[in-house]
Amino acid sequence: MLSPVTSLLILAACSQAVAAHGPLPYRPRCAFGDPCWPSLKEWQSFNESISGRLIVSHPSAVICHQPLYNPILCKKATEEWTNSFWRTDQVGAYSAILWEDGNDQCDINTPVNEPCGPGLVAHYSVAAEDTSDIQAAIHFALRHDIYLVIKNTGHDHLGRSSGRGSLAIWTHRLKGRTWHDAFTPSGAPSCYSAVPAVTLRAGEQWLDVYRDADMHNRIVVGGSARTVGAAGGYLTGGGHSAWAHFYGLAADNLLEVTIVTPTGELKIINEHTDPDYFWAIRGGGGSTWGVITSVTYKTHPSPSHIQVGISQFNTTTDTARRTVIQQVLKSLVYITDSGYTGYGSITPNSLRLIFIQPNGTNATYDSAFASLQQLANVTGVAGGIFQLVFPSWLEYGNVFLQDPNIATNVQDASRLLTKDILLNKHDQLADLVLQYPDLTPGFNFIGKVNSAERDKTSVHDTWRNSHALMTFGIDFVDNATLAYKHERKERLVEISSRMSDIVGPDSGTYVNEANPYEPKWQTVFWGKNYVRLLKIKRRVDPANLLVCNRCVGTDVIYEP
Ligand SMILES: Cc1cc2nc3c(=O)[nH]c(=O)nc-3n(C[C@H](O)[C@H](O)[C@H](O)COP(=O)(O)OP(=O)(O)OC[C@H]3O[C@@H](n4cnc5c(N)ncnc54)[C@H](O)[C@@H]3O)c2cc1C
Ligand SMILES: *[C@@H]1O[C@H](CO)[C@@H](O)[C@H](O)[C@H]1NC(C)=O
Ligand SMILES: *[C@@H]1O[C@H](CO)[C@@H](O)[C@H](O)[C@H]1NC(C)=O
Ligand SMILES: *[C@@H]1O[C@H](CO)[C@@H](O)[C@H](O)[C@H]1NC(C)=O
Ligand SMILES: *[C@@H]1O[C@H](CO)[C@@H](O)[C@H](O)[C@H]1NC(C)=O
Ligand SMILES: *[C@@H]1O[C@H](CO)[C@@H](O)[C@H](O)[C@H]1NC(C)=O
Ligand SMILES: *[C@@H]1O[C@H](CO)[C@@H](O)[C@H](O)[C@H]1NC(C)=O
C-alpha cells in the first residue's frame, strides 16, 4: 500500500489504449508501513552490511515540531531555510518544499505542536560513501521489492528524487574529482585519440567543480547554478549551459559513466562497452538506468574572458509591452545564432534579460543586440542594454551564479522554441504572456546548442533546432489550501496544452525544467526517442525497480 493520504499519486489504470507509449499499470512496491516492509532486525542487519550508513529521514522542518523538536537545530534550520548549500546537505530537504512535505504541511513557521508528517521524504536513506553501499541497497530493495528512490541534491523540478515511504540512496557524500590530460574510455579502439577530461563522483556540485576547474585552467560544461549536482539528474536530463552553443549539452560531453545497474552490477558504460545503454543515459532522465557512481566529461580550454550583456526594458502601456515581448522573441534567433545564451524574466512592467558569451567581442555584441537597442525608441518603452566583461567563468560566477527559488514551491510548464516558432508565432506567445498575468513567464538558458553529438544522445530531437526554452511558473505559500494548490497545478496543465497548440505536437521541452503534471509527457519529453528508451529500460531494469514521476517506463505518475 502506498498511502491513503496522498492525493499526488494516482494509480494509473490498466488501459489498452496506452500500451505502446503509456505507463504500465501501477504496481505497488513495498513502502514503510506496509506488511511486507522488512522487520527491524532485517533493517539492522542491512545497516551493518553498509557500515552503519542507514539513516531515518524526515522533511527538513521536522526538528521544529513535536516529537522531534530541537530548539537549536530548529533555529539553525530557520536561519538557513533558503540557503541552497545548507539545504542540499540535509538528507530530507528538497529545493521545492512540495516535493518533501507532499500535502502533509510540515512547515518551518507553524507552531511546535502542529504535526509534521513524513510527506514524500524516504523513510530510510542510505548515505552512500562506497559503491558497495549502493550495490547492497539495490540487492536489498530487489529482494524485498522495496520502493527505491535516488536522491542527490533534491533540486529536481518534477519530484523525481523523493517518494513516500521509500528507501533512498543518497549520493551527496560521494565527493571526488580527478583531472585527466588525456582520457581514453574503457574499451575504446587503439586508434582513439585521448582527450582532456574530468571524472566526478556522483555527489559533486557545480560550484566546487567550477572552482577546481579554474585552478586547472579548464572549463566543464555545467549549469548556471552553484549547488545543482554535476553528475546526477542535471546530466541525465541533458544539462544546458552557457557553454552549450560551443560545446553542446552536458550529456554531449559525457565520455563514460560508472553505474550500479538496476540488477546490482557495477559497470562502466560508454560508447564502446554498450552504445544503447550509453545513449539512454545521455538524456533519458534520472533514476531510470541505475545509480551513477561517477561520470567523465570532456573539458575545454578556459576562455580569454566572459562577456555579458544586461538588458531591461520597462513598459508603461499594454501595446508597448506586447511590442517588447514580440521583438525580443524574434531577436532571440539572431542573438543566439551569434553565440549568446542567457535567460530572462517578464514582469507586468518590465522585461529583463542577461546574455553571456565566452570570448564575446564588441563586434559580436553590437551586431547581435542592434535590434534590441532599437526597442528603446518605441513609445512607452524605457531601457537598453549594457556590457560587462569578466576575466574568467569563476569571476562571472561569483557575481551571477545563484540558486534561485530555494524553499519555494515553484513549478514550471515549458517548451523549447525553434526558429520557425520564434519568427512566426511570437504574437501567439505574447498573447499567452498577456492572457495569464497570474503566471511568471521567463526564458531559461536559451541558446543555439551545438548538436554535433545529437544522434548519440536521447534528448528530444527538438534540441537540434531550438533557440530558447520558454517557461511559465506558478508558486504558492507552504500553508496555502489544498484547493488553491490544486487549482494552481491545473493552471500549469492548461498552459502546457496552450503551448502545445502553438508549437505543435512534434515539439518538446527540456525534461529537467518541465511541468510535473505534463499530460503527454512521453512525447513532450522525448519525442520519437521514447520507444527506443523504453526498450532499453526493459532490458537494463527487468524488475522495473527504478520508477519516478514521468520517467521512462515508470508506473508512478503524480497528478495535480
Ligand atoms: C537552482 C537551480 C538551478 C538550475 N540550473 C540549471 C541549469 O543551469 N541548467 C540545467 O540544465 N538545469 C538546471 N537546473 C535543473 C536541474 O538540472 C534539475 O533540477 C536536476 O534534476 C537536478 O539534478 P540533481 O541530481 O542535482 O537533483 P536530484 O533532485 O537529487 O535528482 C534529480 C533526478 O536525478 C536522479 N539522480 C540523481 N543522482 C543520480 C545518480 N547518481 N544516478 C541516477 N540518477 C540520479 C534523481 O533520482 C532524480 O530523478 C537547475 C535547478 C535548480 C533548482
Ligand atoms: C545504523 O547503524 C549506525 C551505526 O551503528 C547507527 O548510528 C544508526 O542509527 C543505524 N541506523 C538505523 C536506521 O538504525
Ligand atoms: C576563447 O579563447 C581562448 C583563448 O584564446 C581559447 O583557448 C578558447 O578556445 C576560446 N573559447 C571559445 C569558446 O571560443
Ligand atoms: C568594447 O566596448 C566597450 C564599451 O563600448 C569599450 O569600453 C571597450 O573599450 C571596447 N573594447 C574593445 C576591445 O574595443
Ligand atoms: C532612436 O531614434 C533616434 C532619433 O530618430 C536615432 O537617432 C537613434 O539612432 C535611434 N536609436 C536606436 C538605437 O535605434
Ligand atoms: C526600470 O524600472 C526600474 C524599477 O522599476 C528602475 O530601477 C529602472 O531604472 C528603470 N529603467 C529604466 C531604463 O527606466
Ligand atoms: C499562512 O501563514 C501566514 C503567516 O503565518 C499567514 O499570514 C497566512 O494567512 C497563512 N495563509 C493561509 C492560506 O493559511
Image (spheres, grey):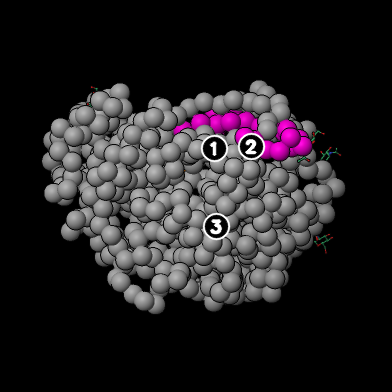
Query: SS at mark 3?
Result: loop
Q: Quadrant of residue 64?
A: top left
Q: CA distance from mark 2 to mark 1?
A: 9 Å
Regarding residue 74, the answer to whether it shows in the image is no
Query: What quarter of the picture does the N terminus occupy?
Result: bottom left
**Residue type, mark 1 in image:** Ile
165 over 347 or under it: above or below: above
Q: CA distance from mark 3 to mark 1?
A: 27 Å
Give the mark nearest the N terminus, 2 or 1: 2
Which of 315 and 33 lies nearest the eye of the viewer? 33
Q: Which mark is residue 323?
A: none
Q: Which residue is mark 3?
A: 510
Q: Are the residues tagged 2 and 1 within 8 Å (C-beta)?
A: yes
Give the mark nearest the N terminus, 2 or 3: 2
Image position, residue 185 (x, y; %): 64, 35
**Residue type, mark 3 in image:** Tyr
Q: Which residue is mark 1?
A: 268
Query: What quarter of the picture does the C terminus occupy?
Result: bottom left
Is residue 384 rendered magenta in the image?
A: no
Q: Which mark is residue 187?
A: 2
Left or right: 333, with 515 as reference point: right
Image position, residue 553 (x, y; %): 42, 59
